[in-house]
Image: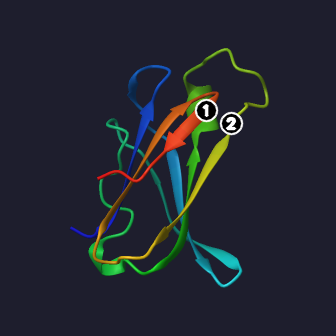
Amino acid sequence: MAGLTTHILDLTHGTPASNVKIELYIQCDDEWQLLMSTVSNSDGRIDKPLLSAENMISGVYELIFHIGEYFQSKQLDLPEPAFLDKVPVRFSIADTTAHYHVPLLISPWGYQVYRGS
């Protein structure tokens, strides 16, 4: 099923990352247009796709994950300012009939992203 989804896993605690603010942008010419802002649920996912099949268009997108706020809420002993605050993930959608899943694995010191299934 076509659409765009995401999932955030907290590698520091070995749990899904809940209550992480996520913003989705699309590039329009030289500007970025905010398409939506949401928050991850208790499973580190969002309750509905970021883009449904009907809203999929070819283009360049950016997800911004607000992980600094997330780790600050966990009351870890971290420096101020945090090493990572907002994690941008820029990617392209070429096939509007495909499912794009963008998982993010996070810690206060690093992250990994890939195209999932």
Q: Is residue 35 left or right of residue 6?
A: right
Q: Position of residue 112 (x, y in %)?
A: 52, 40
The earlier-in-sequence mark between 1 and 2 is 2
Q: How far is mark 1 from mark 2, CA to CA?
A: 7 Å
Would you name the residue on which mark 2 appears? 84
- Which of label 1 and label 2 is nearer to you? 1
Amino acid at circle 1: Gly
Q: Is residue 34 above or below residue 104?
A: below
Residue 103 seen in this snapshot? yes
Kindly indicate whether the residue at mark 2 contacts the one at mark 1 (C-beta within 8 angstroms).
Answer: yes
Amino acid at circle 2: Leu
Q: Position of residue 72 (x, y in %)?
A: 62, 27
- What residue lies at 45% left-to-right and 19% top-to-bottom? 13
Q: Is residue 9 left or right of residue 69?
A: left
Mark 1 lies on a secondary structure that is strand
Q: Position of residue 114 (x, y in %)?
A: 45, 49
In this view, the residue farthest toward the left is 1
